[in-house]
Image (cartoon, rainbow, N blue to C red):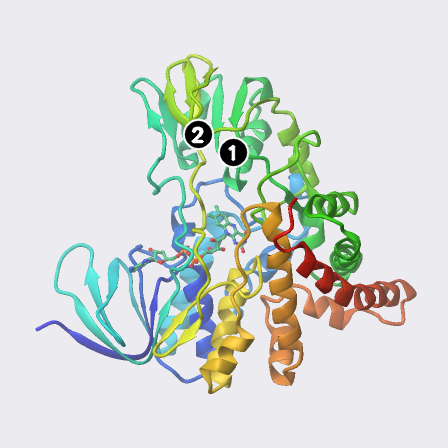
Amino acid sequence: MPETIETDYLIIGAGAVGMSFADTMLTESDADIVMVDRRHAPGGHWVDAYPFVRLHQPSAFYGVSSTSLGADRIDERGSNAGYFELASGAEVAAYFERVMRERFLPSGRVKYLPMHDAEEKGKLEVDATPLLGGGAARIRVRKRIVDSTFFDTAIPVTHERKFEVAEGVECIAPNELPRRAPAHAEYVILGGGKTAMDAGVWLIENGADPGKITWARPRDSWLINRETTQPTTRFFNQSVGGMALQMEAIKAATSVDDLFDRLEAAGLMLRIDPSIRPEMFHFATISIGEVDLLKKIERVVRGAHVAKIEPRRMVLSTGEEVEIGDGALCVDCTASAVAKRPPQSIFEDGRITLQMTRLPNPTFSAALAAYVETHYTDDAERNRLCVPVPLPDMPEDWPAATLGNMTNQLAWSQEQDLRAWITDCRLDGFGKTVRDADRSDPDVADVLARLKVAAMPAAMNLQKLIGAEA
Ligand SMILES: Cc1cc2nc3c(=O)[nH]c(=O)nc-3n(C[C@H](O)[C@H](O)[C@H](O)COP(=O)(O)OP(=O)(O)OC[C@H]3O[C@@H](n4cnc5c(N)ncnc54)[C@H](O)[C@@H]3O)c2cc1C
């Protein structure tokens, strides 16, 4: 007979999103929880992260709400100097392990099943099958199944490559780069996203000659200037001042291209090559120092995906061939990171499908869903407060994502208790900055006034920009 476990909430996935939801449930309710994950440790993709990955954004507002990540230090060296520290992948994985070991399990309310596959067997029933053998446990759920796997995060070390690699070519995931790079004199970076940027920065910071790097980057990306994502009043001008500049840019924009030009002119958006108009936007966040390093890579192959790598050449999806160095080390950074799926209702009968209600803050969004689950009684009301914001792929998607963020923010601001919870939530980046700012300072008052004046016209103009041609 398979073991039967009963629980209030069964969370599929113990990645950052599942962990953040569970953490707020523990604080805000007396529910018990079962967490099932195929991986051997909590933290999701961070458990398999490449060794030089860091958060794009300050550690100060990533992870779970109850437990600080990092020590809120300001980095003194490197390309993030002057800004709040960014946890390394190893730190993020160790953090989630600690949250599980020191908070979740001692609470006596969380049962954690690592190395188990969860399969839904009907409403409120899930089988958790151990990956190394043995019978499945049947889990009967009293309240909801919580699916934290909606984003289906793909990383190079576990994804399926969409290009061929001929014999004799060394093509590795970035996880192996530090170990394999010293044996090579030339490098090919494949992919245009943040992982590819991290690989480029790592190579150059460690002494690789940028002239010996080829970067197959099908699309260029608009990038968020990390300076504008810094919390606390110390960075009020950059973060809240940046929001005022953003609202003013949106208000005045006549097209999506014009909008991005204005955001760039205001120092909010960056791009690696100013002569190329980016066709991608995934909320990648980067410092000006990192962009300056990446500008040194001049051999960029654009406009097509790599279909095949052979010794001394790459064949593109267009059939074009590009020469590469004999024995070049190819670094596969082509995993899609998050899956693009149409959003769905977060709260349904017996189910919660966690998605982002504030982009790009997956852990804040999960914590907010847990708060709304415990403090509201009606699913229609819960869904009104937790409208999923569609993930952008291209600059043209930015207006809908930004309007989604603004609409949710407005709905939250009208709920007194929810508003207070958000401001106290560690994962909320800027509410505390606004609350703690010295309003008697004329510069602070000016920024807040500009923000207020521009917000409504900006929201109206976003509606015009949605669906507009670039
Ligand atoms: C390299 C990289 C850097 C990033 N940096 C940032 C950043 O700085 N800031 C930021 O906000 N976001 C960042 N992100 C986005 C990132 O996706 C989220 O922050 C977050 O880690 C995603 O967590 P998740 O729980 O949704 O997904 P995952 O980490 O993928 O976790 C989901 C878990 O569910 C498990 N699972 C799936 N299906 C099943 C099943 N059927 N049964 C059992 N278990 C299952 C998987 O094993 C996995 O462990 C980054 C992403 C990548 C790839």
Q: How many marks?
A: 2
Which quarter is ligand 1 in? bottom left
The tag on residue 199 is: 1
Residue that numbered label 2 is attached to: 331
- Residue 191 spot, x, y in % from top left: 49, 34
**Whether residue 259 is situated above or below residue 191 in the rendered picture:** below
Q: Quadrant of residue 106?
A: bottom left
Secondary structure category for the residue under label 1: helix
- Residue 195 spot, x, y in % from top left: 50, 39
Quadrant (top left/top right/bottom left/bottom right) for the N terminus: bottom left
Of residues 47 and 446, the one nearer the viewer is 446
Q: Label 1 amino acid?
A: Ala
Quadrant (top left/top right/bottom left/bottom right) for the C terminus: top right
Residue under the image location 59 percent in, 61 percent down: 61
Q: Give the Cα distance between marks 2 and 1.
A: 8 Å
- Residue 416 spot, x, y in % from top left: 65, 84
Of residues 292 and 65, the one nearer the viewer is 292
